[in-house]
Image (spheres, rainbow, N blue to C red):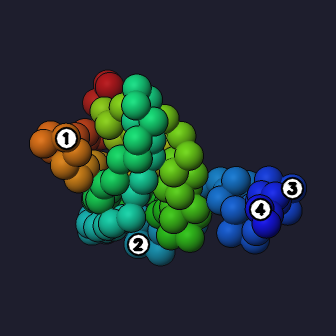
Amino acid sequence: MHKENTMNKNPKKGTLEIRNSRLTAVPNQYPDRDYEVSITLPEFTCLCPISGYPDFATIHVRYIPGRKIIELKSLKLYINRFRDQSHFHEAIVNRIIDDLVACIRPRWMEVVGDFNPRGNVKTVVRTEYRAGRKK
């Protein structure tokens, strides 16, 4: 007997947390010191906007904080929101850096999307932000 899919009617706790997540900043305890934060998010997924097939990537974030740093659980939930969204690789990496910069206003930031090969094509997208420089 086939059971009706009730996931949309009764979403699980994790699904709700991801759906309702917001990037959150916390105060930097060392705002006068230049130091680098490096974050690796190895389980990134999204959907190809043309085929609908899943794309997998490792997202690397490096930054020199200003007055704020990113709260890591909020970043994890934010990244997981992409799993059911359709985006080109370039758009994803640029959106991530735009959202992170808007949240924490770092002195410097780099985001790299290292996408797994699919159909014999591997993509790496890198973008950078520097405070005081126009986009």
Marks 2 & 3, CB-CB < 8 Å contact? no
Label 3 Cα crowd, 10 Å radius (few <14 / some 14-19 / many 20+)? few
**Mark in the foreground, 2 or 3:** 3
Q: Nearer the viewer, residue 54 or 38?
A: 54
Which of marks 2 and 4 precedes in the sequence?
Answer: 4
Q: CA distance from mark 2 to mark 3?
A: 45 Å
Going by the image, does 19 lie left or right of 8? Answer: left
Which of marks 3 and 2 precedes in the sequence?
Answer: 3
**Mark in the foreground, 2 or 1:** 1
- Which residue is disc 4 drawn over? 2
* Residue drawn at the location 77% of the way across and 62% of the way down: 2
Q: Is residue 107 visible?
A: no
Q: Quadrant of the N terminus?
A: bottom right
- The mark found on residue 119 in the picture is 1
Q: Amino acid at mark 1?
A: Gly
> Residue 16 in the image: x percent, y percent?
75, 61
